[in-house]
Amino acid sequence: MTIVVTYAEFAAREAHGVSPAYERLSYAVSRDDEILALLAALPPMKRQPNLLFGVVRLCGGPVEDPAAFHDYTVANWPAIEAEMRVRATQTNEAGRCAVLLPVLAALSQPLALLEVGASAGLCLYPDRYAYRYGDYVIGAGVPVLECAATGVAPPACVPDVVWRAGLDLNPLDVTDPADVAWLEALIWPEHAHRRARLRAAAAVAAAEPPLLVRGDLVDDLPALAAQAPAGATLVVFHTSVMYHVPAPRREAFTKVVRRLPGHWIANEAPDVLPYDALPKPPGAALHNVLALDGTPLAWTRSHGQAIIWFA
Ligand SMILES: C[S@@+](CC[C@H](N)C(=O)[O-])C[C@H]1O[C@@H](n2cnc3c(N)ncnc32)[C@H](O)[C@@H]1O
């Protein structure tokens, strides 16, 4: 995919209807020859809209007005480029627990959760958050995660989690102000509710930190999985991770995870894992596929705001 198409698609399929500022900005970048030339000098994985916009926000630059963004980005490119080269998009969205919950709650309890690509580990606390599926509220904690559920009954109770561990190439620490600043910069400009959610979820994680291990989701998964307690159902899961991972490594991961005991939950873009057949997506917006043990079950929106179960 060319950089022009990447930015135009991000505007149309991810930001449209979700972030007017990023929709505007991403279309503007897709037509901005000067910024496109700067991006072209970066490795392909470092050209993503979320990375560029997050770094500019981290540096204190403007993202509401495309002309001001252009001027700031061109004038400050050396600093922006340096940050883009060392950082990756590590958005940690606790809201994604709302689409995992129906599957987690249906498994044999208690659960030992192992998240690959965990970032700061905020998706490892599905039992501590509360959920609102339409009028139905479940759980007692904060944040309260809102999700529009279609074709699936919300679970009667939150899962029973006895162990939580995360694996990430670069684990983030919610008690480190620099890591929290990066997580906040990755949240889209208008999304005050997501910044509040991040802070509430970070407080949950800080009170009872998960086991977060620096490592690769292929090479280091078996050793971490071996630490899960006996007597609990091991659940290896990942959300919005596989687009970071080259295709041969995704295949290697699939082989490794299928050899482990327990279950495997994937919540990823439809083109990154092979599925025999998928129903038509519910619209033009980007939807992820929620799958259990390789069987696709539902379409989900990327921040956990909706789940549409397959008929
Ligand atoms: C977009 S974040 C998603 C975080 C979390 N799963 C969520 O949904 O909120 C993707 C994470 O995957 C991690 N990651 C990418 N490639 C990885 C690999 N090969 N092994 C382990 N973690 C990886 C990144 O460092 C990043 O923290």
Image (cartoon, helix red, strand yellow):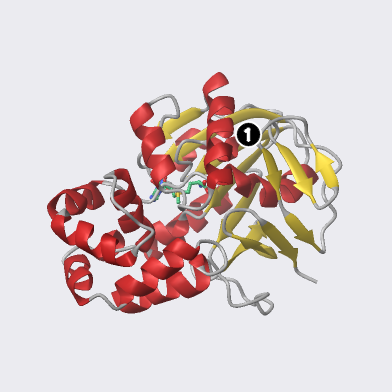
Quarter of the rendering containing residue 246? bottom left
> Which part of the image, by quadrant, shows the N terminus?
bottom left
Dot 1, crowdedness within 10 Å: few (<14), some or many (≥20)? some
Q: What's under tag 1, amino acid-wise?
A: Tyr
- Where residue 245 appears, as percent x and y from the top left, is 39, 58
Q: How many marks?
A: 1
Decide which of 144, 263 is in the foreground and name it. 144
Relative vertical location of residue 2 with respect to residue 211 in this rendering, above or below:
below
- Dot 1: element: loop
Decide which of 86, 261 is in the foreground and name it. 86
- State whether label 1 is within 8 Å of ligand 1: no
Say whether residue 290 is left or right of residue 249. Answer: right
Residue under circle 1?
125
The residue at 33%/31% (across/down) is 178
- Where residue 119 appears, as percent x and y from the top left, is 45, 41
Relative vertical location of residue 135 with respect to residue 113 in this rendering, above or below:
below
Say whether residue 20 is left or right of residue 53. Answer: right
Say whether residue 257 is left or right of residue 71. Answer: right
> Which part of the image, by quadrant, shows the C terminus?
bottom right
Q: Is residue 107 visible?
A: no
Quarter of the rendering containing residue 167? top left
- Where residue 180 appears, as percent x and y from the top left, is 41, 34
Say whether residue 18 is left or right of residue 161. Answer: left
The residue at 20%/62% (across/down) is 71
- Where residue 28 appears, as percent x and y from the top left, is 33, 73
The residue at 59%/44% (across/down) is 193
Q: Is residue 148 visible?
A: yes
